[in-house]
Image (spheres, rainbow, N blue to C red):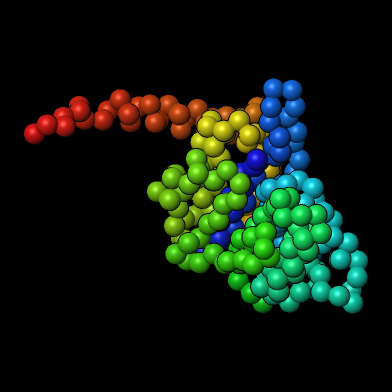
Amino acid sequence: MTYCVAMRLSSGMIFVSDSRTNAGVDHISSFRKLHVFQRDGERTLVLQSAGNLATTQSTLSLLRRGCEDDGAPNLMNCTSLYDVALLVGDTLRAVIQRDGEEFGGSLMLGGQIKGEAPRLFQIYPQGNFIEASTDTPYFQIGESKYGKPIIDRVLHYHTPLEQAMQCALISMDSTLASNISVGLPLDVMIYPGDSFSCEQQYHLTEKHPYFSQLRQRWSSGLLSVFSQLPPLKLEE
């Protein structure tokens, strides 16, 4: 299992992914699930993956191989994020049809191509997709239920990028605390709109000082607020 969250906001985009693909008593595997395709000044594309690892790795390998063929649509020559989403969806569907529907996977595609605003898509195993909006500025894939409540309470389209990243990390922390199939390290990226840059990428381990401090502050803050709740009085 995995947990990935992506946010499209007025000032840019946020991406956070864990790296655990299998958890058990004897075996824990980690693989990167946040993948960046970059051409300076022209496009920045981010793909996040969840589901069967063989399916998502095959899909990404085919997409990378396609970038070597200038004569066919690929990640580097599509003229809009919508066209990229179509390409990614078609590739994912073809891999699943080849290998079997039981080996499913899902993807999130975000980023910006010059001439467009930043855009974010959630791509389903069937190859179809939906796009984030100002009313629904974020998507999740994988083990999403534990991290969703904090995002719903905090995030809106005009949330500053720094606060949005804090929200995404707390959402991830809630998931880490409740589900052993989601695990560190984390891959995160902050994309300021119109920057066409992938410089703000970070790899967060359990020992990362800021992430450790954030987790501790959030946990102690919750306990403090809980202790201040009004006494239980169900009968009036």
Q: Which residue is drawn at 74% across and 67% down?
A: 90
Drawn side of residue 137 relative to residue 223, left or right = right
Which residue is more in the foreground, 21 or 133?
A: 21
- Residue 89: image location, x then y, percent: 71, 65
Drawn side of residue 122 relative to residue 228, left or right = right
- Residue 149: image location, x then y, percent: 43, 45
Q: In which quarter of the image is residue 225?
A: top left
Q: Is residue 73 above or below residue 45?
A: below
Q: Which residue is drawn at 88% across and 61% down?
A: 65
Which residue is more in the foreground, 51 or 229?
A: 51
Residue 106 showing in the rendered view:
yes
Q: In this view, does 120 lie above or below 235?
A: below
Residue 208 showing in the rendered view:
no
Q: In which quarter of the image is residue 206?
A: top right
Drawn side of residue 92 relative to residue 111, left or right = right
Which residue is more in the foreground, 188 or 136?
A: 136
- Residue 119: image location, x then y, percent: 61, 67
Outermost residue, left direction?
Answer: 236
Q: Residue at x 66, y 33 (%)?
A: 184
Q: Which residue is drawn at 68% across and 65% down?
A: 127
- Residue 131: image location, x then y, percent: 57, 67
